[in-house]
Image (cartoon, rainbow, N blue to C red):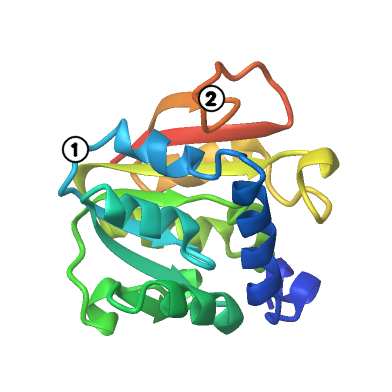
Amino acid sequence: MSRWNELTGATSGEEYAARFAALARGGEDVHGEARFCAALVPAGARVLDAGCGTGRVMIRLAELGYDCVGVDLDASMLAVAREQAPHLPWFHADLAAFEPARLGVAGDFDLVVAAGNIFPLLAPGTEATVVGRLSAALRPGGLLVAGFGLDRAHLPVPPGITLPEYDDHCAAAGLTLVDRFATWDAAPYDGGGYAVSVHRR
């Protein structure tokens, strides 16, 4: 079982969406991840939102003209995403077993984004498998972007993966580190408790 399901019981979709809706109403910028991705690949590019949750990032990218596919294991989160954007392709699937062809989706994505602490919340021991699956879904030259917490201050659970471990998984999957930032606003990474990593296939 994923650490996310242990934490939430896979029933927190409405609550999660309400929290971000409240932030948006209060004037908070809730589109940093989408803006970051849009700076990496041009409009029209194919984007896989791996662990798409309620669809906040993917819906914004679709509005900006990207060809998006969303995948998540939490049915409660996907229910919110489908209600908000029924015209977009949302799939219920485990990233550790993700194969685009089995879902009737073409591979060769230009960018795969894993926002929202996806890697620390996976089922323990599946991190390398998930990196491999996501790498395989990329076209040659495509980018994997992952942002996640590295300490308890930035995570709802104890840390489950270090940056060196993540980089090792990426290297084993044929990915090369391009850049690393401390935030989705592209602040330079300073060794802190959150990192946004960009790897290229």
Q: Quadrant of the N terminus?
A: bottom right
* Count of number-bearing discs: 2
Which residue is the site of mark 2?
181
**Residue 136: percent from left, percent from top:** 29, 58
Residue 126 placement (x, y as % from top left): 58, 65
Q: Against 11, is 114 above or below?
A: above
Is residue 133 left or right of 195 when viewed as pictured? Answer: left
Q: Measured from the top left, where is residue 133 in percent x and y?
A: 38, 62
Where residue 128 appears, as percent x and y from the top left, is 52, 56
Give the spatial CA distance, label 1 vs label 2.
20 Å
- Which residue is at a point 47% across and 63% down the rendered structure image? 52
Tell me, for residue 162, which label it has, or none: none
Report the amino acid beneath label 2.
Phe
Secondary structure category for the residue under label 2 = strand
Which secondary structure lies at badge 1?
loop
For residue 103, above or below residue 106:
below
Which sits in the foreground, 122 or 18?
Answer: 18
Q: Quadrant of residue 77?
A: bottom right
Label 1 with label 2: CB-CB less than 8 Å: no
Q: Residue at x 31, y 31 (%)?
A: 39
- The quadrant the C terminus occupies is top left
| Residue 6 in the figure: left or right of residue 10 | right
Q: Residues within 10 Å of mark 2 (few under 14, many from 20)?
A: some
- Left or right of 1 in this view: 137: left
**As rendered, which of 12 and 28 lies closer to the eye?**
28
- Please name the residue that numbered disc 1 is placed on: 42
